[in-house]
Image (cartoon, rainbow, N blue to C red):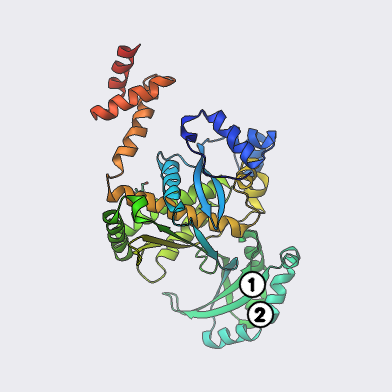
Protein backbone atom coordinates (compact mmCIF):
# COMPACT_ATOMS: atom_id res chain seq x y z
CA UNK A 1 0.00 0.00 0.00
CA UNK A 2 1.56 3.30 -1.04
CA UNK A 3 -0.62 6.34 -0.79
CA UNK A 4 0.04 9.99 -0.27
CA UNK A 5 -3.48 11.34 0.18
CA UNK A 6 -3.87 10.99 3.92
CA UNK A 7 -6.31 13.59 5.10
CA UNK A 8 -6.24 15.05 8.58
CA UNK A 9 -2.69 13.87 9.32
CA UNK A 10 -2.01 17.24 10.92
CA UNK A 11 -4.63 16.58 13.59
CA UNK A 12 -2.86 13.45 14.90
CA UNK A 13 -0.02 13.20 17.38
CA UNK A 14 3.51 12.82 15.97
CA UNK A 15 3.65 9.16 17.02
CA UNK A 16 0.28 8.35 15.40
CA UNK A 17 1.43 10.05 12.20
CA UNK A 18 4.61 8.03 12.22
CA UNK A 19 2.61 4.82 12.72
CA UNK A 20 0.55 5.59 9.60
CA UNK A 21 3.59 6.49 7.51
CA UNK A 22 5.43 3.38 8.73
CA UNK A 23 2.52 1.10 7.78
CA UNK A 24 2.13 2.84 4.45
CA UNK A 25 5.82 2.40 3.64
CA UNK A 26 6.52 -0.97 5.30
CA UNK A 27 9.15 0.47 7.64
CA UNK A 28 10.91 -1.84 10.11
CA UNK A 29 11.09 -1.06 13.84
CA UNK A 30 14.67 0.21 13.39
CA UNK A 31 13.64 2.49 10.55
CA UNK A 32 10.79 3.92 12.61
CA UNK A 33 13.23 4.52 15.45
CA UNK A 34 15.65 6.25 13.06
CA UNK A 35 12.91 8.62 11.91
CA UNK A 36 11.80 9.34 15.45
CA UNK A 37 15.22 9.99 16.97
CA UNK A 38 17.08 11.69 14.14
CA UNK A 39 18.75 8.57 12.87
CA UNK A 40 22.32 8.72 14.08
CA UNK A 41 24.07 8.07 17.36
CA UNK A 42 26.87 10.19 18.76
CA UNK A 43 29.31 7.45 17.72
CA UNK A 44 28.09 7.54 14.14
CA UNK A 45 28.24 11.33 14.09
CA UNK A 46 31.82 11.16 15.38
CA UNK A 47 32.75 9.17 12.27
CA UNK A 48 30.99 11.55 9.89
CA UNK A 49 32.64 14.90 10.73
CA UNK A 50 35.38 16.29 12.93
CA UNK A 51 35.45 17.58 16.52
CA UNK A 52 31.96 16.26 17.21
CA UNK A 53 30.23 17.64 20.30
CA UNK A 54 26.71 16.35 19.84
CA UNK A 55 23.79 16.27 17.45
CA UNK A 56 21.78 19.24 16.21
CA UNK A 57 18.12 18.39 15.68
CA UNK A 58 15.79 19.77 13.00
CA UNK A 59 12.11 18.76 12.74
CA UNK A 60 11.29 16.03 10.23
CA UNK A 61 7.77 16.19 8.79
CA UNK A 62 5.99 14.56 5.90
CA UNK A 63 4.31 16.24 2.94
CA UNK A 64 1.16 14.56 1.68
CA UNK A 65 -0.89 14.58 -1.55
CA UNK A 66 1.97 14.22 -4.03
CA UNK A 67 1.14 12.36 -7.22
CA UNK A 68 4.30 12.19 -9.35
CA UNK A 69 4.12 10.53 -12.76
CA UNK A 70 0.96 8.77 -11.62
CA UNK A 71 2.54 7.43 -8.41
CA UNK A 72 1.46 8.58 -4.93
CA UNK A 73 4.50 9.64 -2.92
CA UNK A 74 4.77 10.66 0.74
CA UNK A 75 7.65 13.09 1.08
CA UNK A 76 9.75 13.44 4.24
CA UNK A 77 11.06 16.98 4.71
CA UNK A 78 13.62 18.21 7.26
CA UNK A 79 13.18 21.92 7.90
CA UNK A 80 13.14 24.44 10.72
CA UNK A 81 10.72 26.76 8.87
CA UNK A 82 7.03 26.75 9.81
CA UNK A 83 4.44 26.49 7.00
CA UNK A 84 6.78 24.85 4.49
CA UNK A 85 5.44 21.29 4.85
CA UNK A 86 1.81 22.41 5.00
CA UNK A 87 2.33 24.58 1.91
CA UNK A 88 3.96 21.77 -0.09
CA UNK A 89 1.08 19.44 0.83
CA UNK A 90 -1.49 22.07 -0.19
CA UNK A 91 0.27 22.81 -3.45
CA UNK A 92 0.42 19.09 -4.24
CA UNK A 93 -3.28 18.66 -3.40
CA UNK A 94 -4.23 21.40 -5.84
CA UNK A 95 -2.22 19.69 -8.60
CA UNK A 96 -4.14 16.40 -8.30
CA UNK A 97 -7.17 17.38 -10.39
CA UNK A 98 -4.89 18.35 -13.28
CA UNK A 99 -3.12 14.98 -13.16
CA UNK A 100 -0.37 15.64 -10.61
CA UNK A 101 3.27 16.28 -11.45
CA UNK A 102 4.75 15.07 -14.71
CA UNK A 103 8.53 14.87 -14.67
CA UNK A 104 11.50 14.24 -16.92
CA UNK A 105 15.24 14.09 -16.37
CA UNK A 106 18.51 14.06 -18.26
CA UNK A 107 21.23 11.46 -17.71
CA UNK A 108 23.07 11.93 -14.37
CA UNK A 109 26.11 13.66 -15.85
CA UNK A 110 28.39 15.82 -13.72
CA UNK A 111 31.31 17.99 -14.77
CA UNK A 112 34.83 17.96 -13.34
CA UNK A 113 36.87 21.03 -14.11
CA UNK A 114 40.64 21.06 -14.72
CA UNK A 115 42.34 24.48 -14.91
CA UNK A 116 45.42 24.56 -17.14
CA UNK A 117 47.60 27.64 -16.90
CA UNK A 118 50.95 28.81 -18.22
CA UNK A 119 50.63 27.60 -21.80
CA UNK A 120 52.05 29.83 -24.54
CA UNK A 121 49.59 28.52 -27.10
CA UNK A 122 46.27 27.97 -25.27
CA UNK A 123 44.31 27.26 -28.48
CA UNK A 124 46.93 24.74 -29.55
CA UNK A 125 46.84 23.20 -26.06
CA UNK A 126 43.06 22.98 -26.26
CA UNK A 127 43.27 21.02 -29.51
CA UNK A 128 46.02 18.80 -28.14
CA UNK A 129 43.72 17.88 -25.23
CA UNK A 130 40.68 17.25 -27.45
CA UNK A 131 42.77 15.10 -29.81
CA UNK A 132 43.56 12.75 -26.89
CA UNK A 133 39.96 12.68 -25.59
CA UNK A 134 39.61 8.90 -25.76
CA UNK A 135 42.87 8.29 -23.97
CA UNK A 136 41.92 10.83 -21.29
CA UNK A 137 38.52 9.18 -20.82
CA UNK A 138 40.14 5.74 -20.58
CA UNK A 139 42.57 6.92 -17.92
CA UNK A 140 39.75 8.57 -15.94
CA UNK A 141 37.56 5.46 -16.13
CA UNK A 142 40.43 3.34 -14.79
CA UNK A 143 40.06 5.28 -11.53
CA UNK A 144 36.50 4.07 -10.98
CA UNK A 145 35.89 0.58 -12.41
CA UNK A 146 32.89 0.18 -10.09
CA UNK A 147 31.13 3.18 -11.63
CA UNK A 148 31.94 1.88 -15.12
CA UNK A 149 30.57 -1.58 -14.21
CA UNK A 150 27.28 0.13 -13.23
CA UNK A 151 27.01 1.76 -16.64
CA UNK A 152 28.59 5.09 -15.67
CA UNK A 153 31.91 6.72 -16.45
CA UNK A 154 33.21 9.40 -18.78
CA UNK A 155 30.79 10.42 -21.52
CA UNK A 156 32.56 13.45 -22.94
CA UNK A 157 35.36 15.97 -22.80
CA UNK A 158 35.17 19.70 -23.41
CA UNK A 159 37.95 22.27 -23.42
CA UNK A 160 37.71 26.04 -23.72
CA UNK A 161 40.13 28.92 -23.59
CA UNK A 162 38.97 31.51 -21.09
CA UNK A 163 40.34 35.01 -20.61
CA UNK A 164 41.22 35.93 -17.01
CA UNK A 165 43.05 38.77 -15.32
CA UNK A 166 46.02 36.35 -15.09
CA UNK A 167 45.96 35.72 -18.82
CA UNK A 168 44.35 32.98 -20.90
CA UNK A 169 43.70 29.58 -19.35
CA UNK A 170 42.46 26.33 -20.79
CA UNK A 171 39.56 24.92 -18.81
CA UNK A 172 38.91 21.24 -19.40
CA UNK A 173 35.56 19.74 -18.48
CA UNK A 174 35.41 16.00 -17.95
CA UNK A 175 31.79 14.88 -18.27
CA UNK A 176 31.01 11.86 -16.13
CA UNK A 177 27.83 9.81 -15.86
CA UNK A 178 27.64 9.27 -12.11
CA UNK A 179 24.62 6.89 -12.10
CA UNK A 180 23.17 6.79 -8.58
CA UNK A 181 26.02 8.64 -6.88
CA UNK A 182 26.01 12.38 -6.32
CA UNK A 183 29.38 12.05 -7.96
CA UNK A 184 31.68 14.55 -6.23
CA UNK A 185 34.05 11.83 -5.00
CA UNK A 186 34.10 10.04 -8.33
CA UNK A 187 34.76 13.09 -10.50
CA UNK A 188 37.22 14.72 -8.10
CA UNK A 189 39.27 11.50 -8.00
CA UNK A 190 39.29 11.36 -11.79
CA UNK A 191 40.22 15.02 -12.19
CA UNK A 192 43.08 14.76 -9.71
CA UNK A 193 44.38 11.62 -11.37
CA UNK A 194 44.30 13.22 -14.82
CA UNK A 195 46.18 16.40 -13.86
CA UNK A 196 49.75 15.10 -14.57
CA UNK A 197 48.66 13.69 -17.93
CA UNK A 198 47.01 17.00 -18.92
CA UNK A 199 50.23 18.80 -17.92
CA UNK A 200 52.22 16.38 -20.04
CA UNK A 201 49.97 16.95 -23.07
CA UNK A 202 49.94 20.75 -22.78
CA UNK A 203 53.25 21.62 -21.12
CA UNK A 204 51.17 23.81 -18.79
CA UNK A 205 50.56 23.82 -15.07
CA UNK A 206 47.31 22.46 -13.63
CA UNK A 207 45.90 24.24 -10.57
CA UNK A 208 42.25 23.45 -9.84
CA UNK A 209 40.80 19.99 -10.44
CA UNK A 210 37.35 19.81 -8.91
CA UNK A 211 33.66 19.20 -9.59
CA UNK A 212 31.49 22.03 -10.92
CA UNK A 213 28.32 22.43 -8.88
CA UNK A 214 26.67 24.08 -11.86
CA UNK A 215 25.25 20.67 -12.76
CA UNK A 216 23.64 21.81 -16.01
CA UNK A 217 23.84 18.34 -17.54
CA UNK A 218 21.97 16.70 -14.67
CA UNK A 219 18.58 18.32 -14.86
CA UNK A 220 15.21 17.40 -13.37
CA UNK A 221 12.00 18.94 -14.67
CA UNK A 222 8.43 18.93 -13.40
CA UNK A 223 5.22 20.31 -14.82
CA UNK A 224 1.72 20.52 -13.36
CA UNK A 225 -1.62 21.91 -14.44
CA UNK A 226 -3.52 23.66 -11.66
CA UNK A 227 -7.18 23.91 -12.64
CA UNK A 228 -8.54 27.44 -12.22
CA UNK A 229 -11.55 26.23 -10.23
CA UNK A 230 -9.27 24.30 -7.82
CA UNK A 231 -7.07 27.25 -6.96
CA UNK A 232 -9.59 30.05 -6.49
CA UNK A 233 -10.65 31.08 -9.98
CA UNK A 234 -9.34 33.00 -12.99
CA UNK A 235 -8.11 35.97 -10.91
CA UNK A 236 -5.74 33.70 -9.02
CA UNK A 237 -4.46 32.23 -12.30
CA UNK A 238 -3.81 35.74 -13.62
CA UNK A 239 -2.16 36.90 -10.41
CA UNK A 240 0.24 33.93 -10.41
CA UNK A 241 1.10 34.45 -14.08
CA UNK A 242 1.79 38.09 -13.25
CA UNK A 243 4.01 37.13 -10.29
CA UNK A 244 5.90 34.68 -12.48
CA UNK A 245 6.42 37.33 -15.16
CA UNK A 246 8.18 39.55 -12.64
CA UNK A 247 10.42 36.74 -11.34
CA UNK A 248 11.41 35.94 -14.94
CA UNK A 249 12.95 39.41 -15.40
CA UNK A 250 13.73 40.90 -11.99
CA UNK A 251 16.59 39.39 -9.96
CA UNK A 252 15.30 40.92 -6.70
CA UNK A 253 12.02 39.05 -7.03
CA UNK A 254 13.66 35.98 -8.62
CA UNK A 255 15.86 35.53 -5.53
CA UNK A 256 12.83 35.24 -3.22
CA UNK A 257 10.82 33.23 -5.74
CA UNK A 258 13.69 30.72 -5.94
CA UNK A 259 14.17 30.81 -2.17
CA UNK A 260 10.58 29.58 -1.91
CA UNK A 261 11.37 26.75 -4.33
CA UNK A 262 14.45 25.80 -2.30
CA UNK A 263 12.37 25.72 0.91
CA UNK A 264 11.05 22.40 -0.40
CA UNK A 265 14.03 21.21 -2.42
CA UNK A 266 16.54 21.72 0.40
CA UNK A 267 14.25 20.10 2.99
CA UNK A 268 14.04 16.89 0.94
CA UNK A 269 17.76 17.05 0.11
CA UNK A 270 18.49 17.31 3.83
CA UNK A 271 16.08 14.49 4.74
CA UNK A 272 17.87 12.14 2.33
CA UNK A 273 21.36 12.92 3.65
CA UNK A 274 22.37 14.71 0.45
CA UNK A 275 24.57 17.77 0.13
CA UNK A 276 22.25 20.76 0.53
CA UNK A 277 24.97 23.27 -0.41
CA UNK A 278 25.66 21.49 -3.69
CA UNK A 279 21.96 21.61 -4.52
CA UNK A 280 21.69 25.29 -3.57
CA UNK A 281 24.83 26.25 -5.52
CA UNK A 282 23.55 24.31 -8.53
CA UNK A 283 20.10 25.87 -8.42
CA UNK A 284 21.26 29.47 -8.09
CA UNK A 285 24.07 29.23 -10.64
CA UNK A 286 21.64 27.54 -13.06
CA UNK A 287 19.20 30.39 -12.47
CA UNK A 288 21.95 32.81 -13.54
CA UNK A 289 23.25 30.80 -16.48
CA UNK A 290 21.97 33.28 -19.09
CA UNK A 291 23.99 36.11 -17.51
CA UNK A 292 21.13 37.47 -15.39
CA UNK A 293 19.55 35.81 -12.37
CA UNK A 294 16.10 34.41 -13.23
CA UNK A 295 13.35 32.27 -11.73
CA UNK A 296 13.72 28.50 -11.97
CA UNK A 297 10.01 28.10 -12.69
CA UNK A 298 7.54 29.66 -15.10
CA UNK A 299 3.72 29.90 -14.96
CA UNK A 300 1.43 30.28 -17.98
CA UNK A 301 -2.29 30.22 -18.63
CA UNK A 302 -3.39 27.49 -21.05
CA UNK A 303 -6.21 27.49 -23.59
CA UNK A 304 -8.70 26.32 -20.92
CA UNK A 305 -7.78 29.17 -18.59
CA UNK A 306 -5.92 26.85 -16.20
CA UNK A 307 -2.49 27.51 -14.74
CA UNK A 308 0.49 25.54 -16.07
CA UNK A 309 3.60 25.56 -13.88
CA UNK A 310 6.95 24.20 -14.98
CA UNK A 311 10.28 24.03 -13.27
CA UNK A 312 13.76 22.93 -14.26
CA UNK A 313 16.74 22.64 -11.93
CA UNK A 314 20.00 20.76 -11.48
CA UNK A 315 19.57 17.64 -9.35
CA UNK A 316 23.01 16.60 -8.15
CA UNK A 317 21.80 14.08 -5.59
CA UNK A 318 22.65 10.47 -4.95
CA UNK A 319 21.14 7.40 -3.35
CA UNK A 320 24.45 5.59 -2.86
CA UNK A 321 27.60 6.78 -1.11
CA UNK A 322 28.14 9.44 1.54
CA UNK A 323 25.57 10.15 4.21
CA UNK A 324 22.73 8.77 2.07
CA UNK A 325 24.18 5.31 2.62
CA UNK A 326 25.33 5.51 6.22
CA UNK A 327 22.59 7.65 7.78
CA UNK A 328 19.74 5.34 8.88
CA UNK A 329 17.27 8.25 8.92
CA UNK A 330 18.17 9.15 5.33
CA UNK A 331 17.68 5.53 4.24
CA UNK A 332 14.31 5.37 5.98
CA UNK A 333 13.22 8.59 4.27
CA UNK A 334 14.20 7.24 0.85
CA UNK A 335 12.13 4.15 1.62
CA UNK A 336 9.10 6.26 2.59
CA UNK A 337 9.29 7.85 -0.87
CA UNK A 338 9.79 4.47 -2.55
CA UNK A 339 12.96 5.84 -4.13
CA UNK A 340 15.41 3.33 -5.52
CA UNK A 341 17.68 5.46 -7.69
CA UNK A 342 19.02 9.01 -7.87
CA UNK A 343 16.89 9.73 -10.92
CA UNK A 344 13.72 9.12 -8.87
CA UNK A 345 14.96 11.54 -6.23
CA UNK A 346 15.61 14.25 -8.84
CA UNK A 347 12.00 13.93 -10.01
CA UNK A 348 10.75 14.31 -6.43
CA UNK A 349 12.94 17.39 -5.89
CA UNK A 350 11.57 19.10 -8.99
CA UNK A 351 7.97 18.25 -8.02
CA UNK A 352 8.39 19.47 -4.44
CA UNK A 353 10.06 22.65 -5.68
CA UNK A 354 7.12 23.35 -7.97
CA UNK A 355 4.47 22.54 -5.34
CA UNK A 356 6.24 24.74 -2.79
CA UNK A 357 6.60 27.60 -5.24
CA UNK A 358 3.01 27.37 -6.44
CA UNK A 359 1.71 27.38 -2.85
CA UNK A 360 3.77 30.47 -2.02
CA UNK A 361 2.63 32.32 -5.15
CA UNK A 362 -0.98 31.40 -4.50
CA UNK A 363 -0.76 32.70 -0.94
CA UNK A 364 0.93 35.88 -2.18
CA UNK A 365 -1.72 36.28 -4.86
CA UNK A 366 -4.57 35.93 -2.37
CA UNK A 367 -4.42 36.56 1.37
CA UNK A 368 -0.61 36.98 1.66
CA UNK A 369 1.58 34.62 3.63
CA UNK A 370 1.46 36.27 7.02
CA UNK A 371 -1.82 34.81 8.26
CA UNK A 372 -0.58 31.24 7.88
CA UNK A 373 2.81 32.16 9.30
CA UNK A 374 1.24 34.01 12.19
CA UNK A 375 -0.97 31.15 13.32
CA UNK A 376 2.08 28.86 13.48
CA UNK A 377 4.07 31.57 15.18
CA UNK A 378 1.21 31.94 17.69
CA UNK A 379 1.39 28.23 18.49
CA UNK A 380 5.14 28.52 19.16
CA UNK A 381 4.55 31.53 21.42
CA UNK A 382 1.78 29.64 23.27
CA UNK A 383 4.20 26.76 23.92
CA UNK A 384 6.87 29.21 25.14
CA UNK A 385 4.31 30.59 27.59
CA UNK A 386 3.73 27.11 28.99
CA UNK A 387 0.64 25.95 27.09
CA UNK A 388 0.22 22.19 26.81
CA UNK A 389 -2.15 19.89 24.91
CA UNK A 390 -5.37 21.57 23.75
CA UNK A 391 -4.32 24.84 25.38
CA UNK A 392 -1.80 25.42 22.58
CA UNK A 393 -4.41 25.65 19.84
CA UNK A 394 -6.89 27.57 21.97
CA UNK A 395 -4.37 30.21 23.14
CA UNK A 396 -2.83 30.48 19.66
CA UNK A 397 -6.12 31.02 17.88
CA UNK A 398 -7.22 33.67 20.41
CA UNK A 399 -3.93 35.57 19.98
CA UNK A 400 -4.11 35.28 16.18
CA UNK A 401 -7.71 36.61 16.18
CA UNK A 402 -6.69 39.55 18.39
CA UNK A 403 -3.49 40.07 16.34
CA UNK A 404 -1.63 40.27 19.65
CA UNK A 405 0.92 37.50 19.57
CA UNK A 406 3.38 37.65 22.44
CA UNK A 407 4.37 35.58 25.44
CA UNK A 408 2.79 37.94 28.01
CA UNK A 409 -0.59 37.80 26.29
CA UNK A 410 -0.30 34.02 26.00
CA UNK A 411 0.36 33.79 29.73
CA UNK A 412 -2.71 35.94 30.48
CA UNK A 413 -4.90 33.78 28.27
CA UNK A 414 -3.52 30.67 29.93
CA UNK A 415 -4.30 32.04 33.40
CA UNK A 416 -7.84 32.96 32.32
CA UNK A 417 -8.44 29.53 30.84
CA UNK A 418 -7.08 27.43 33.73
C1 LIG B 1 9.33 32.26 2.48
O1 LIG B 1 10.20 31.34 3.10
C2 LIG B 1 9.24 32.01 0.99
C3 LIG B 1 8.44 33.01 0.18
O2 LIG B 1 8.93 34.34 0.41
C4 LIG B 1 8.58 32.64 -1.29
C5 LIG B 1 8.02 33.65 -2.26
O3 LIG B 1 7.96 34.84 -1.96
O4 LIG B 1 7.69 33.20 -3.39
C6 LIG B 1 6.98 33.01 0.60
Q: Is residue 96 left or right of residue 53?
A: left
- How many neighbours does mark 2 have within 10 angstroms: few (below 14), some (14-19), or many (20 or more)? few
Q: Residue at x 40, y 60 (%)?
A: 309
Residue 131 point in image, percent of width and height: 63, 86
According to the picture, the residue beneath numbered tag 2 turns out to be: 200
Measure the C-alpha gap from mark 2 to mark 1: 9 Å
Q: Position of residue 356 (x, y in %)?
A: 42, 50
Q: Position of residue 223 (x, y in %)?
A: 46, 61
Dot 2: what SS?
A: helix
Which quadrant does the N terminus fall into?
A: top right
Which quarter of the figure has residue 377? top left
| Dot 2 or dot 1, earlier in sequence | 1
Labels 2 and 1 touching (C-beta < 8 A): no
Check disc 1 and report its element: helix, strand or loop.
helix
361 displayed left or right of 265: left
| Residue 74: mark | none
Residue 416, horizontal then vertical, whole percent: 30, 12
Q: Above or below — where is 363 with respect to 279?
A: above
Instruction: Please tell me in which quadrant of the rendered image residue 114 appears.
Output: bottom right
Kindly tell me whether residue 322 is visible in this rendering: yes
- Category of crowding for the residue at label 1, using alpha-carbon neighbours closer than 10 angstroms: few (below 14), some (14–19), many (at least 20): some
Q: Residue at x 39, y 20 (%)?
A: 391
| Residue at which label 1 appears | 195
Quarter holding the C terminus? top left
Give me the residue at 42% from left, 45% from top: 90
Nearest the camera: 415 or 358? 358
* Quadrant in the picture for residue 305: bottom left
The answer to whether one can see residue 263 in this image is no
Amino acid sequence: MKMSRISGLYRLSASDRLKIVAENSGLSGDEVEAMKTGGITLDQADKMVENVLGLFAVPLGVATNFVIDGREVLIPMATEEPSVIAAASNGARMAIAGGGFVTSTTQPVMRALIQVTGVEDPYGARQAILARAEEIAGRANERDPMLVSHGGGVVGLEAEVVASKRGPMVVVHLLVDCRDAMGANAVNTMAEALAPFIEEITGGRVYLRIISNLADLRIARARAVFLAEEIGGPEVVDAIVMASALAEVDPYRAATHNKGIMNGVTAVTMATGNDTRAIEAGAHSYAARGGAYRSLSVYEKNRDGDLVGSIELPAAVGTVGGATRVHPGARANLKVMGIICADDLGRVLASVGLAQNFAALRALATEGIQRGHMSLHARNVAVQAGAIGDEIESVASKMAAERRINVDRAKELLRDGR
